[in-house]
Image: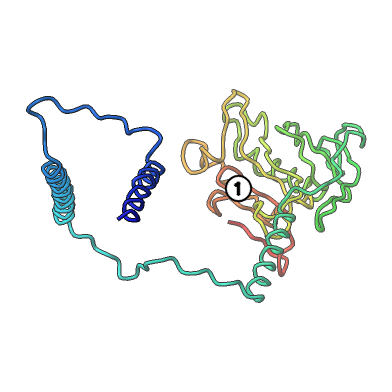
Amino acid sequence: MVLLRWVLVVLVLVLPGAAWSDAPETSPRPRMRPPSGAVVSIADAAVAEATAARQAAEQAEALRLATERAAAEALAARPPVTVNPLAVATSLFPRHRTDSVMQRYAAIARDRARDRQVAAPAAVTAPTRSGGPQQRGICGVRGLEGRELPRITSSTRGCGIDQPVSVTSVQGIPLSMAATIDCDTARAFDRWVRTEMVPAVGRTGGGVAQIRVIGAYSCRTRNSQPGARISEHGRGRAIDVAGYRLVNGDTVSVLRNYRRGSHSRSLRRMYEAACGIFRTTLSPDSDRFHQDHFHFDLAQHRGGGTYCR
């Protein structure tokens, strides 16, 4: 009995100390009690929270279904789309260019570069006023007035004039611009003005007061087309006439008057007579490049014939 009593005493002293060692340093903060009449049990609060979550999920699902249904109805209301049977879902993957393709394109690029070089205005020795003096009777023809020029050279093969002249007047009729040509072309032009142009116009409007020249020496291809042969203009053996002005001030134009009007007959007469004096004659009836002028040149044709259109 004495021993049991001592054991109980020890237990009474030890057990409260162990419990005190696990106790928190401070007590939890007390929560305010809900007002009277608003006390809800823990079980009821959990049920209400679960019910609210379920209702929110049902509303979200209903909204999703309604959106999908509206989109499906809108798609069904659209007109049917015809799909091209040749269409592909994705673009074709580009194939690598072969060496033969690269070589072919390189050759084409070289040809185009060469054509541009030929078509571009060549570097020429420009006619200067350091030639002979202004005088009548150049090229041995009394009706030609102008001056002799130094030799014209060019880095482009086929261009240049060995003995150029600058013609400013023919048969006493001034030109609208000095025409740089060779003597053969100058003599042919003088003959055409003297025997064909002046008689064709006659005394209409008082006669011819000025000849409108718009082209003479120019180092370029025919009709300035890439890849074409060098024009006779590049050799100083061609001249372009766009019309003339009369003494009374009226202007006769190849563009306006060749096909219609009171001057059409005289223009056609002088043009047709140029065939033979020149070896090539081109009028508005020839092609789209000569709608506003007559082209005259001394090109050499096969058999020594002429080309007149």
On the image, numbered disc 1 is attached to which residue? 271
Image: 111 above or below 156: below
Residue 177 sits in quarter = top right
Q: Position of residue 118 (x, y in %)?
A: 74, 56
Image: 304 above or below 42: below
Residue 230 sits in quarter = bottom right
Instruction: Count neighbours of disc 1 (C-alpha within 10 A) and say few if under 14, some if 14 to 19, many if 20 or more.
Output: many
Image: 193 above or below 33: below
**Nearest the eye: 242 or 268:** 242
Residue at (58, 56) in percent of width and height:
309
Q: Position of residue 119 (x, y in %)?
A: 71, 53
Residue at (35, 56) in percent of width and height:
3
Residue 147 sits in quarter = top right
Q: Secondary structure at mark 1?
A: helix
Q: Is residue 145 left or right of residue 220?
A: right
Q: Position of residue 68 (x, y in %)?
A: 18, 53
**Nearest the eye: 13 or 39:** 13
Q: Position of residue 108 (x, y in %)?
A: 66, 66
